[in-house]
């Protein structure tokens, strides 16, 4: 069975500071990994995905994530955040179906 | 416009009533999904469909019914709404079970 743990439920951060959102997964087979973003009162939008190949994945809006198989992690990073990055972020893992973490709320302050 | 649309966006209903949430996609994706989003639980899969007339249970199917007579539509029905079904419901579509899913805007359902 697969599962996803997002280690931080809330992350406050100042504008232009870096941010890292942590995600650990468990799965008995090869996985596909995703990060989604949800802005207030909207649906989820794909930020980036790891299917195979390079372990460093670049996504939209300056985000990137690194797949670490030995640590079963897929942490999301951005070197400099903007106010507009305030949102909820979901990590998801898929072997035969998508399973989502509980989410991390990022609040960017000026 | 191409995409996935849900209706209504907001719904208030009474305990015991039947309510149907609609979902329509224009991409001709074979797979469609219904999730519910609750604080602290992330998104949980209710039902999914691999093609027209093929549906299967997800993680939390009790109290819900789905149908898929046409590829583009995937309605979700709460046969007798309960307060525990107060939630935000998201419909999604995709080309497979393990590929990225494209989400609708969500329906906020309140059962009073």
Image: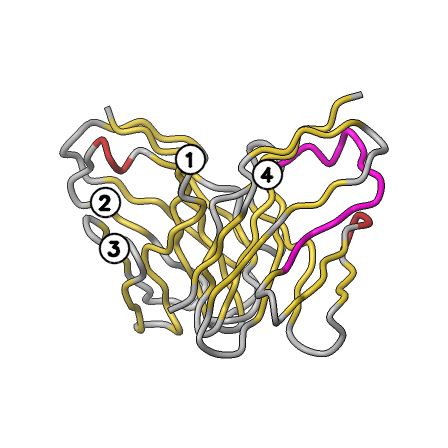
Quick check: do tags 1 and 3 share a chain?
yes
What residue do we see at 31% from left, 58% from top? Answer: B59
CA separation in Å, label 2 and label 1 = 20 Å
Residue A4 colored in magenta in the image: no
Front residue of this view, candidates B97 and A34: A34
Comes first in the chain, label 2 or label 3: 3
Return the residue at label 4: A88
Return the residue at label 1: B39
Camera-nearest label, 2 or 1: 1
Q: Is residue B75 above or below residue A109?
A: below
Q: Chain of mark 2?
A: B
Where's residue A10, x and y in %?
58, 33
Disc 1: CA contacts within 10 A as few (<14), some (14-19) or many (>=20): few
Return the residue at label 2: B78
Q: Is residue A40 above or below residue B105?
A: above
Comes first in the chain, label 1 or label 3: 1
Element type at marker 1?
loop
What residue do we see at 32% from left, 55% from top? Answer: B46
Q: Chain of mark 1?
A: B
Front residue of this view, candidates A82 and B79: A82
Task: Give the magenta-colored segment's residue range.
Answer: A74-88
Return the residue at label 3: B61
CA separation in Å, label 4 and label 3 = 25 Å
Q: Are marks 1 and 3 in contact (CB under 8 Å)?
A: no
CA separation in Å, label 1 and label 4 = 11 Å
Where's residue A25, x and y in %?
51, 61
Where's residue A53, x and y in %?
73, 78
What residue do we see at 39% from left, 54% from top? Answer: B34
CA separation in Å, label 1 and label 3 = 18 Å
């Amino acid at each position: 069975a697969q599962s996803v743990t997002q280690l931080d439920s809330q992350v406050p951060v100042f504008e232009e500071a870096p941010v890292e959102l942590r995600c650990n997964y468990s799965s008995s087979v090869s996985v596909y990994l995703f990060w989604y973003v949800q802005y207030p009162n909207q649906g989820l939008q794909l930020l980036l995905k790891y299917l195979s190949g390079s372990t460093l994945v670049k996504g939209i809006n300056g985000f990137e994530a690194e797949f670490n198989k030995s640590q079963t992690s897929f942490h999301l990073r951005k070197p400099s955040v903007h106010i507009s990055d305030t949102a909820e972020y979901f990590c998801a893992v898929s072997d035969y179906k998508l399973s989502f973490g509980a989410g991390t709320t990022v609040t960017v302050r000026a | 416009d191409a995409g996935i649309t849900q209706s209504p966006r907001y719904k208030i209903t009474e305990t015991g009533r039947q309510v149907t949430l609609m979902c329509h996609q224009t991409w001709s994706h074979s797979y469609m999904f219904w999730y519910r989003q609750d604080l602290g639980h992330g998104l949980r899969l209710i039902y999914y469909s691999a093609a027209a007339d093929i549906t299967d249970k997800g993680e939390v199917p009790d109290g819900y019914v789905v149908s898929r007579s046409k590829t583009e539509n995937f309605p979700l029905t709460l046969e007798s709404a309960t307060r525990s079904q107060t939630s935000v419901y998201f419909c999604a579509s995709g080309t497979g079970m393990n590929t990225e899913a494209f989400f609708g805007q969500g329906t906020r359902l309140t059962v009073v």
